[in-house]
């Protein structure tokens, strides 16, 4: 198979290596390019920073082949998932998404990893599954595209919260409690958007949350720890060596009026820290000071 990978960062490169192990020919296309390589692709994989997806796709003609999104986040102004942006810009309905607990460095090193590939068409999900599945990269398929994409996007927000909790030295009890409530909030937001609740108990939900909200390999987690030290967003981002998708995704969820405010208290407080100058310790007090309620 000829597979074009749009985006040549660490994540796109790692998935390109996964495909290469199965004998597929991979061709990397930079966001700075304006044309496709001079051959026909069988599949396109999109591994771009989410806020750049729409503009970059607009530079290329629609490839007319199935597309797999590797990007995890939501567009700020529209709140759209990456699959929606791809369909809108390219007019391509055959779009799937890959998500789950996967650090690029470990994938590139050939260490075992497990992920989910989702599409509204089960056949399409299984089609992408067939071109990537192998012992070191085990894939599951899902028809809950909304849930899998939202899990991958929202966990980036909560990974910042996990990093801040760690950076503030609030203890393991607090971190476990926080991530449990993050999972509940993620599920609530997802179900309101049309996802299935059980999806968030899977790889793209709790699986990815556990990984990125507890490990220094996660840029979002590291961002949170530095945030807890009193650094600003402008001071932190240059230190991370890459995109921190949780920052714009928090903005997107906060601005989305379709998500009731009482459904997203953690996002609301994190947004206040990121964009409104509220100190992390004050945001913690605001969360802990909320009225008692049923679980």
Image (cartoon, helix red, strand yellow):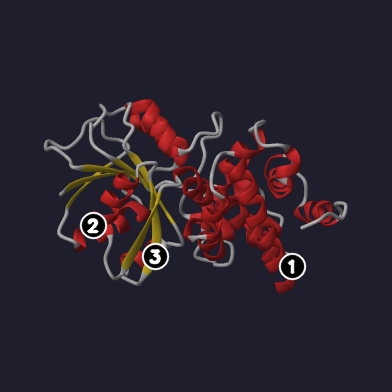
Question: Does label 2 or label 1 sit earlier along the sequence?
Answer: 2
Q: Which residue is mark 3?
A: 114
Q: Residue at x 21, y 47 (%)?
A: 3
Q: Residue at x 56, y 29 (%)?
A: 77
Give the camera-side residue of 141 and 157: 141
Q: Secondary structure at mark 3?
A: strand
Image vertical order of residue 35 relative to residue 5, above or below: above
Q: Nearer the viewer, mark 1 or mark 3?
A: 3
Q: Which residue is mark 1?
A: 174
Image vertical order of residue 156 relative to residue 55, above or below: below
Which percent across, then down, holds residue 253? 62, 39
Res. 19 mark? 2
Farthest left residue in view: 39
Do residues under tags 2 and 3 come within 8 Å of each other at their CB atoms?
no
* Neighbourhood count class around disc 2 (C-alpha, 10 Å): few under 14, some 14–19, many 20 upward: many
Of the 4 image quadrants, the one containing the C terminus is bottom right
Q: CA distance from mark 2 to mark 1?
A: 40 Å
Which percent across, then down, holds residue 159? 59, 57
Q: Is residue 123 visible?
A: yes
């Amino acid at each position: 198979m000829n597979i074009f990978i749009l985006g040549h960062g660490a994540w796109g490169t790692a998935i390109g290596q996964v495909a290469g192990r199965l004998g597929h020919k991979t061709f990397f296309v930079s966001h700075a390019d304006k044309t496709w390589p001079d051959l026909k692709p069988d599949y396109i994989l999109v591994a771009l920073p989410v806020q750049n997806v729409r503009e970059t796709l607009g530079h290329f003609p629609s490839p007319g082949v199935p597309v797999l999104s590797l990007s995890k986040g939501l567009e700020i102004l529209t709140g759209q998932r990456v699959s929606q942006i791809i369909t809108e810009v390219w007019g391509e309905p055959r779009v799937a998404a890959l998500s789950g607990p996967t650090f690029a460095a470990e994938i590139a090193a050939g260490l075992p990893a497990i992920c989910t590939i989702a599409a509204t068409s089960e056949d399409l999900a299984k089609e992408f599954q067939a071109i990537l599945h192998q012992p070191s990269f085990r894939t599951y398929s899902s028809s809950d595209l909304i849930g899998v994409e939202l899990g991958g996007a929202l966990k980036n927000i909560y990974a910042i919260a996990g990093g801040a909790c760690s950076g503030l030295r609030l203890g393991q009890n607090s971190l476990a409690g926080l991530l449990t409530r993050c999972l509940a909030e993620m599920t609530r937001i997802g179900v309101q958007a049309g996802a299935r609740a059980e999806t968030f108990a899977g790889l793209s939900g709790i699986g990815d949350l556990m990984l990125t909200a507890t490990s220094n390999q996660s840029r979002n987690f590291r961002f949170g720890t530095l945030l807890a030290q009193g650094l600003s967003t402008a001071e932190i981002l240059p230190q991370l060596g890459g995109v921190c998708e949780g920052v714009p995704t928090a903005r997107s969820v906060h601005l989305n009026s379709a998500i009731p405010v009482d459904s997203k208290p953690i996002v609301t407080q994190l947004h206040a820290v990121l964009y409104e100058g509220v100190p992390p310790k004050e945001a913690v007090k605001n969360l802990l000071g909320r009225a008692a309620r049923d679980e």
